[in-house]
Amino acid sequence: MKQALGGATKDMGKMLGGEEEKDPDAAKKEEERQEALRQQEEERKAKYAKMEAEREGIRQGIRDKYGIKKKEEKEAEAAAAMEQASEGSLTRPKKAVPTGCGDEEEEESIVDTVMKFIPTPLMDMFNKK
């Protein structure tokens, strides 16, 4: 009976914030646990790297079959084209002007088109001024 109370008092001491017993192998066990976690993480990364390599091989086969280029290749070609266009120029290349922006003849035709939809009494007011 004395043994049962002795164990209970040790547990009560821990619960009340007393000193816990130090496991002499605790540091070694923790180190082994950390090493096991690192090893599991490396295995997981290797597994997913292998899966991604297989997927990339399949993707490349599809690209070859249908003549599709990778995004990186398209971007590289576009950059090369921009460099070639601006090779002899000291300034940056001009941006393309969208249709309808800049031609005065088109602007006049747009004004004429709008004027067609304005009622006649309002047209008379514009013509008087």
Image: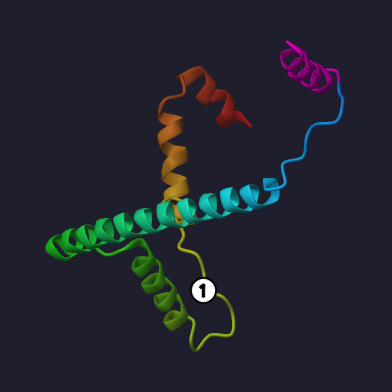
Q: Is residue 8 magenta?
A: yes
Q: Is residue 63 above or below residue 120?
A: below
User: In front: 117, or 62?
Assistant: 62
Q: Which residue is at a point 46% across and 23% down the rendered structure image?
A: 118
Which residues make up the magenta segment?
A: 1-16
In terms of secondary structure, what is the magenta stretch mainly? helix
Q: Is residue 112 above or below residue 34?
A: above
- x, y percentage for residue 108? 46, 46
Q: Is residue 57 magenta?
A: no
Q: Which residue is at a point 78% across and 18% down the rendered structure image?
A: 6
Q: Which residue is mark 1?
A: 93
- x, y percentage for residue 104? 48, 54
Q: Is residue 91 above or below residue 16?
A: below
- x, y percentage for residue 80? 41, 78
Snapshot quadrant of residue 70: bottom left
View extreme (top): residue: 1
Q: Amino acid at mark 1?
A: Pro
Is 53 on the left or on the right of 11, as rendered?
Answer: left
View extreme (left): residue: 65
